Amino acid sequence: MISKFLGSGAPAAASINLILQVAMGAALLAGAALARRKRYKAHAICQTTVLVINTVAIAWMMWPSFQYTVLPHLHNRWYLAYYLWPIAHGVLGAFAELFGIYIALVAGTNLLPARLKFRRWRFWMRFELALWRLVLLTGLGTHLFWYTAVPLP
C-alpha cells in the first residue's frame, strides 16, 4: 500500500524508511533554523533525536539490506549503478552518522578532551548539514535504482 503510494515495487519497509529519511531531512533543516534563532537547546534536541532515529534506521533497514544485496557483489559488480549508488550512500552515510555522533559528543558532553573538540561550530554544523543532504540524495538514487529501474539480469 505505501509502495503503491510511492509508485514503486519497493517493500513496505523500504518505503517507510524513505519517508522517514525525508522527514528527518526536513527536521534537520528545522533544527538549523532553530540554531539561527539562537534556540540552541531546541536545536540540540531536534538534531540529536534525528541522529538517534537514524542510527536505528541504519541498524534495522539499511545495513542488513546493504549486507545482503551489495556486499556479496562488491568484488565483481561494484561499478554498476545498481551497486554504486548504495556504495556511495553507505560510505557518505557512515561518515555523516559518525561525524554527527562526534558533534553530539563535543556539544553535549565532556567525554572528549579539549584537544579533540572543534571550535568553528558554524562551519562544521553547516558541513554536516550539507553532507546529510548529499546522503539523502544518494539514498533517493539508491531507492530509484533498486525499486524503479529495470532489474539486472
Image (tube, rainbow, N blue to C red):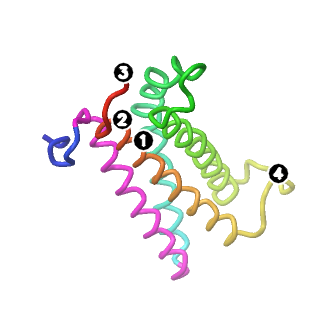
Answer whether labels 4 and 2 touch (C-beta < 8 Å): no
Per the image, label 3 sits on a secondary structure element best described as loop
Which residue sits at x=62%, y=54%?
Answer: 104
Q: Nearer the viewer, mark 1 or mark 3?
A: 3
Per the image, label 1 sits on a secondary structure element best described as helix
Identify the residue position indicated by label 2 in the image: 146
Residue 43 placed where, x, y %? 51, 68
Answer whether labels 1 and 2 touch (C-beta < 8 Å): yes
Identity, as a three-letter code, of the amino acid under mark 3: Pro
Identify the residue position indicated by label 4 in the image: 113
Please give the label number shown on residue 142. Answer: 1
Identify the residue position indicated by label 3 in the image: 153
Q: Which residues are magenta?
A: 9-38
Which residue sits at x=73%, y=48%?
Answer: 111
Q: Earlier in the sequence, mark 4 or mark 3?
A: 4
The answer to whether residue 87 is left or right of residue 141 is right
Identity, as a three-letter code, of the amino acid under mark 2: Trp
